Image: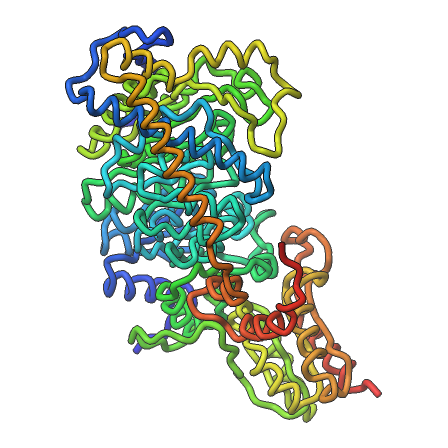
């Protein structure tokens, strides 16, 4: 084989937006984005926010553990879930409740998980999706492996992974980009660039001008999208999914958004960012942006809004009720899923633990 | 039937299972065209093609993480880590995900993968090529840790590891890759994981070891036999989950026990075995449990590694200590 050294090419990162922060159309909507679809996306975003508000409330009142609010990022999360096909698979990061709900993962599941119950990741309707990933960026490699399995079996399915801006500093993220490009995997990476990784601002996270350009090192396209524009996210994710599904490889999408809440309920963002900054971010948030558009075009009205709020609150209230009524796990459950078959050494420890179960402290 | 080495037995097991089951795939660095740096995957690329014999980019966390994703889809990936000293970048994936997937999804997803890695010293390799970190893996719930000591065990245990529904760390003692040859029928018969093997029966003392150290342990048993000391030798083979019953049965018979391993002494898996024997067979013991191990030092480079590795002399000395205990 003749040795040759290719000359470096030029690269481009494009930015996509359809509806700006003033609810003005900056690019014609795609044809599938009918009033019905827009209303659906709007309702789902409102449902996520209603759920999120209640989840924080459950933590504050001692009914649930530490919880990461998705406030401000509803558009990214809902749009991804809407664009994916049922047979696709997600390996998500931990702030993706909108995506999870779109996938059929229930509110009760999410409450249970953050309430400290492993059964919250035993999804009934989304059996192949990964549970949320806590260690940061490791999920990108799981998605790469899932994508490889699809490719090996010649299935027209796509793996999707989500991650925060902080996570893109980690090795596993880069290793996944590298593998995805090398193997031309049916894989879509979506970065929720919400400007803050707990207390570290995006500007202290990376020296790159964009996060999207990190895809160039993997050998494929990276694009930026206004993450508070649900129309744009839905379109860009849909394009990336179809590209992957037809064997044309991975895409990295940087969705630019803002974490309006604290990192989790255990965090106080006032320690590291100004109220002025947060107030300014509120003027760009995704739900009001779409509502103003819908109202202006008479696709929505106050009556529908009131009914939607009431419906969302009722649905969340029912989920809370079901969550509170969740029967406790048995002692056996903490042993029985370590291996498919309980080895003798664990059977012995399980029997020992059961001698003390009545007096073991629980809340 | 021709006799084969331990490394050839591994190749034979991989080829057998790949032939049998399309879900079995192998991945790792240099495992394709090159057949692996030790040649464990020799010929597999030609036989099964690049879709199933995947040369990966050079990134260990990636190898483990991708294997986890594949396994969640029902594939049975066998990942090669070139040396166990290079597996550390993958520990986050192995500990935080492979080991926990079944538990954290309450059985919805699982991780039927194998992580193979050459391990141990005595091959005059550069630094980071000779470590014995098996106890670290045995400490993590959800993993199984298997260490073959002969061509036949390597074949049967690797088949079992690939068929196992849970993640298996399969550590291959590189020092004995080509040390002995054995007839190994290519019959697809697996050996049980989680079972110790009594490889030599005796009445006077129990010698417990695994991996390459069994070679020195057997030599020690031979020379002790010439003095009239009948040693029972047990190959632990699976250190997690441990088959303590086989060990207890032997110690209850002999009353004396020496544990031999290459890994550092403090927190080595010998400590756990000694603790369980003390816990469950104290009154059978005629002497304290002895350990012959590596030292609590960084693995020496090749010029001094023979001072570190357990030798026949050190094993015989420990046996004498236990026999002379009053």
Give me the residue at 42% from left, 28% from top. A49
Give me the residue at 49% from left, 77% from top. B195
Q: Is residue B193 left or right of residue B138?
A: left
Q: What's the coloring here?
A: rainbow
- Specify the quadrant of the image occupied by residue A316: top left
- Residue found at the very far right of the displayed protein: B326
Q: Nearer the viewer, residue B130 or B279?
A: B279
Q: Nearer the viewer, residue B93 or A161?
A: A161
Q: Where's the C terminus of chain A, which quadrant? A: bottom right
Image coordinates for residue A171, horizontal then vertical, percent: 49, 33
Q: Nearer the viewer, residue A15 or B251?
A: A15
> In the figure, A221 relative to B256: above or below?
above
Give me the residue at 38% from left, 18% from top. A286
> In the figure, A9 relative to A65: above or below?
above
> In the figure, A348 relative to A216: above or below?
below
Q: Is residue A361 left or right of residue A158?
A: right
Q: Is residue A77 left or right of residue A168?
A: left
- Specify the quadrant of the image occupied by residue A156: top left
How many numbered marks does the figure carry? 0
Query: Would residue B232 be seen by someone viewing this image from the given angle?
Result: yes
Image coordinates for residue B70, horizontal then vertical, percent: 33, 49
Give me the residue at 32% from left, 9% from top. A23
Query: Would residue A11 be seen by someone viewing this image from the given angle?
Result: no
Q: Nearer the viewer, residue B148 or A78?
A: A78
Image coordinates for residue B128, horizontal then vertical, percent: 59, 48
> In the figure, A295 relative to A215: above or below?
above
Q: Where's the N terminus of chain A, which quadrant? A: top left
Q: Is residue B78 left or right of residue A300?
A: right
Image coordinates for residue B303, horizontal then vertical, percent: 66, 53
């Amino acid at each position: 084989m003749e040795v040759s050294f290719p000359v470096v090419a030029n690269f481009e990162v494009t930015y996509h937006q359809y509806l700006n922060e003033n609810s003005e159309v900056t690019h014609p909507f795609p044809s599938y984005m009918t009033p019905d679809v827009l209303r659906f996306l709007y309702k789902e975003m409102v449902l996520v926010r209603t759920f999120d508000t209640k989840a924080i409330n459950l933590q504050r009142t001692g009914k649930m553990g530490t919880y990461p609010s998705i406030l401000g990022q509803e558009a990214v999360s809902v749009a991804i879930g809407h664009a994916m096909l049922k047979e696709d698979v997600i390996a998500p990061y931990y702030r993706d409740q909108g995506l999870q709900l779109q996938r059929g993962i229930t509110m009760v599941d999410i409450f249970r998980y953050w309430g400290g119950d492993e059964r919250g990741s035993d999804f009934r309707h989304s059996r192949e999706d990964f549970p949320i990933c806590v260690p940061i960026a490791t999920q990108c490699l799981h998605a790469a492996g899932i994508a490889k399995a699809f490719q090996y079996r010649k299935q027209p399915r796509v793996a999707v992974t989500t991650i925060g801006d902080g996570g893109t500093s980690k090795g596993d993220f880069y290793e996944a980009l590298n593998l995805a490009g090398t193997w031309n995997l049916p894989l879509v990476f979506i970065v929720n660039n919400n400007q803050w990784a707990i207390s570290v601002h995006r500007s202290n996270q990376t020296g790159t001008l964009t996060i999207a350009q990190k895809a160039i090192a993997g050998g494929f396209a990276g694009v930026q999208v206004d993450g508070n524009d649900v129309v744009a996210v839905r379109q860009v994710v849909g394009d990336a999914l179809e590209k992957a599904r037809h064997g044309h490889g991975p895409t990295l999408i940087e969705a630019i958004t803002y974490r309006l809440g604290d990192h989790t309920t255990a965090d106080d963002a006032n320690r590291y960012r100004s109220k002025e900054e947060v107030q300014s971010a509120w003027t760009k948030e995704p739900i009001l942006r779409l509502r103003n558009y819908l109202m202006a075009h008479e696709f929505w009205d106050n009556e529908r809004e009131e009914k939607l709020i009431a419906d969302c609150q009722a649905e969340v209230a029912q989920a809370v009720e079901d969550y509170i009524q969740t029967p406790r796990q048995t002692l056996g459950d903490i042993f029985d899923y370590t291996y498919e078959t309980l080895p003798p050494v664990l059977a012995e420890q399980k029997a020992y633990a059961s001698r003390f179960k009545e007096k073991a402290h629980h809340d | 039937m021709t006799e084969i080495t331990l490394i050839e037995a591994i190749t034979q097991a991989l080829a057998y299972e790949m032939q049998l089951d399309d879900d079995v795939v192998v991945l790792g660095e240099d495992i394709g065209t090159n057949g692996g740096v030790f040649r464990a995957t020799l010929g597999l690329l030609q036989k099964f093609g690049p879709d199933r014999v995947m040369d990966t980019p050079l990134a260990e966390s990636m190898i483990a993480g991708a294997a986890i994703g594949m396994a969640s889809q029902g594939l049975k990936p066998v990942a090669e880590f070139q040396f166990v000293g290079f597996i550390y970048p993958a520990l986050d994936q192995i500990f935080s995900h492979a080991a926990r997937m079944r538990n954290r999804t309450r059985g919805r997803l699982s991780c039927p993968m194998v992580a193979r890695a050459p391990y141990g010293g005595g091959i005059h390799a550069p630094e980071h090529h000779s470590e014995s970190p098996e106890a670290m893996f045995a400490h993590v719930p959800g993993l199984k840790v298997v260490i073959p000591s002969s061509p036949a065990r390597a074949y049967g245990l690797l088949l079992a590891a690939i068929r196992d529904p849970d993640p298996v760390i399969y550590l291959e003692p590189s020092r004995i890759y080509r040390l002995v040859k054995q007839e190994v029928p290519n019959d697809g018969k697996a050996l049980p994981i989680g079972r110790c093997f009594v490889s030599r029966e005796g009445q006077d003392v129990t010698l417990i070891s695994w991996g390459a150290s069994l070679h020195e342990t057997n030599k020690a048993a031979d020379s002790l036999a010439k003095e009239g000391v009948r040693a029972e030798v047990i190959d632990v083979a699976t250190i997690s989950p441990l088959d303590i019953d086989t060990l207890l049965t032997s110690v209850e018979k002999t009353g004396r026990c020496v544990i031999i391993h290459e890994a550092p002494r403090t927190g080595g898996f010998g400590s756990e075995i000694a603790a369980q024997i003390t816990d469950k067979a104290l009154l059978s013991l005629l002497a304290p449990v002895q350990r012959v191990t590596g030292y609590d030092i960084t693995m020496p480079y090749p010029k001094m590694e023979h001072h570190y590795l357990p030798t026949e002399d050190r094993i015989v000395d420990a046996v004498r200590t236990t026999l002379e205990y009053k």
